[in-house]
Amino acid sequence: AALDKRGWIENPDLSSPCFDFKWTLRAKDIDHGTLLENQIVNHFEKNTSITTKVGLCKSLKNLIWFNNVDIDTFYPRCFDLTDVADYEDFLDEFKRVKVMMNHE
């Protein structure tokens, strides 16, 4: 509605190459290889290491290799449940929290 008020025109053809600004929910809906210099999109190419929950989780956990940083001191516990080790860590953490809640 705000863009309509500013005089923007919506292109109903989602696959059209004719746009100034394109907003999508999925990054794969944007072909970065065909973007013109004046076209703006809401996704960056190849940036999942910081823009997905799993990517951010892995990036933060890798901080230990670059600087002795304990992410648990500044970021909530996070787990990649598709990773076997992380899944096991999640189960352990869940059990610990459950036990602590039952003893309060």
Image: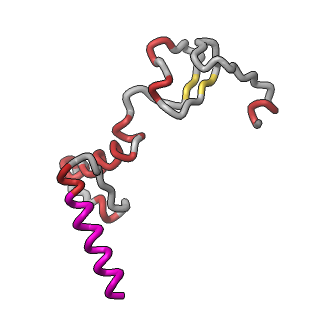
Which residue is depicted at the point 60% across and 25% down?
22
**Mostly what secondary structure, the magenta segment?**
helix
Relative vertical location of residue 40 with respect to residue 79 in this rendering, above or below: above
Image position, residue 30 (x, y; %): 49, 22
Q: Is residue 103 magenta?
A: yes
Image position, residue 13 (x, y; %): 64, 17
Image position, residue 23 (x, y; %): 59, 29
Image position, residue 24 (x, y; %): 56, 30
70 or 11, which is in the foreground?
Answer: 11
Relative vertical location of residue 67 with respect to residue 50 in this rendering, above or below: below
Relative vertical location of residue 93 with respect to residue 102 in this rendering, above or below: above
Which residue is depicted at the point 33% across and 61% down?
77
Quadrant housing the N terminus: top right
Question: In this figure, which colouring scheme has been used for the structure?
Answer: secondary structure
- Magenta stretch, residue numbers: 88-104
Which residue is depicted at the point 40% across and 42% down?
52
Relative vertical location of residue 21 with respect to residue 66 in this rendering, above or below: above
Is residue 34 toward the left or the right of residue 84 in the image? right
Is residue 1 toward the left or the right of residue 65 in the image? right
Which residue is depicted at the point 29% across and 68% down?
94
